[in-house]
Amino acid sequence: MSEALIDIVAVSGHTGVSRWQALARRGSVAGVATMRPIILFRRGFLLPGAPAPRPGAADLSLYVEPAWRRRGIGSRLLAAVREQAVVPSLVIDVITGSPGEAFSLRNGFRRIRSSRHDLLTYGDVHGAWLGELVDVEHPGYRLVHWTGDPVGAPRAGELLRDPSRPGSAVLTAAETDGDLAAYVVAVVGAPSPRRARQYGPAVFAEHRGRPLGRWVNAALIQRLREIHPEVNEIETDTAENDLAMLAEREYLGFRPLRRTRLYELTLP
């Protein structure tokens, strides 16, 4: 089968989401590309100072069916995205060493982050031990919690000033004299209702040297299960060169899941 028989067509999607399909004869789909606004928690609610895409960048996902690979279909899908995109850059997350990474390098994407994804299963965590971590006193600091919809508030401090309400986000923070010292966030519902995605913890510079990150993380794990008992796993990712954070993950019971790399393509 020839790639000349493939048509690249735009298809309707959700508001703000652009989607293209590579259609073979009789309407079978050989590949698909999707461009969507960067989700706040995926790219913006990370550790302060972490490598980040350009403001206004869009998330790109691109997939070609195995039987149609190495025929230029991925490049044609990317060309369609580039032709219609009105964003400064595209960001794509790929598994290390995968065909997706080779494709990104061939097409001029620049690596901006290497990450290790870890998974915590609640069945592997002893509840009493977790409670002991949460109950340890940290003089001058107190735990605060927030739940709700994160849309519209780009900072943890702004979320904490809003009243809690039902929603997909769970935020746990440490405060001292009204100042935010550390925080960690989890989001439930996507891609699986039984797996939450965790971002952080982040500890602000003037409060480092104390185990605040471990404290808020343990409290988040505990509170997340209380609010969302259907969740039985937490996935998180950490920069591969952040050895201290990786060690904290392992201490709390996270186990390595996979490695990914974040690439960015600047658009004219």
Image (cartoon, grey):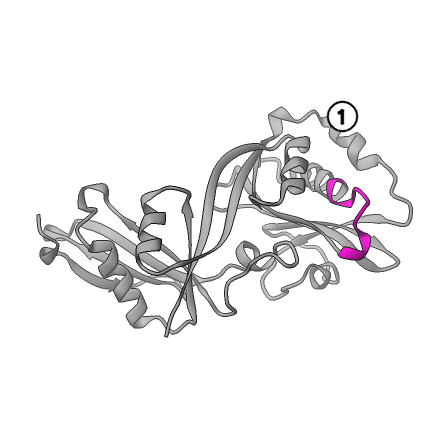
Residue 63 percent across, percent down from the top left: 30, 49
Residue sitting farthest toward the right: 139
Q: Depth check: 169 or 237 in front?
A: 237
Q: Is residue 238 covered in magenta? A: no
Q: Residues within 10 Å of mark 1 (few under 14, many from 20)?
A: few
* Image: magenta residue range: 205-214
Q: Is residue 93 left or right of residue 209?
A: left
Q: Is residue 210 covered in magenta? A: yes
Q: Depth check: 199 or 23 in front?
A: 199
What is the count of numbered marks?
Answer: 1
User: For residue 109, what is the image quadrant?
Assistant: bottom left
Residue 215 percent across, percent down from the top left: 77, 41
What residue do we see at 60% from left, 66% from top? 152
Residue 38 percent across, percent down from the top left: 48, 61
What residue do we see at 51% from left, 41% from top? 193
Residue 263 percent across, percent down from the top left: 43, 56
Check disc 1 and give the amino acid type.
Ala
Dot 1: what SS? helix
For mark 1, what is the residue?
Answer: 128
Decide if residue 232 is in sight here: no
- Quadrant the C terminus occupies: bottom left
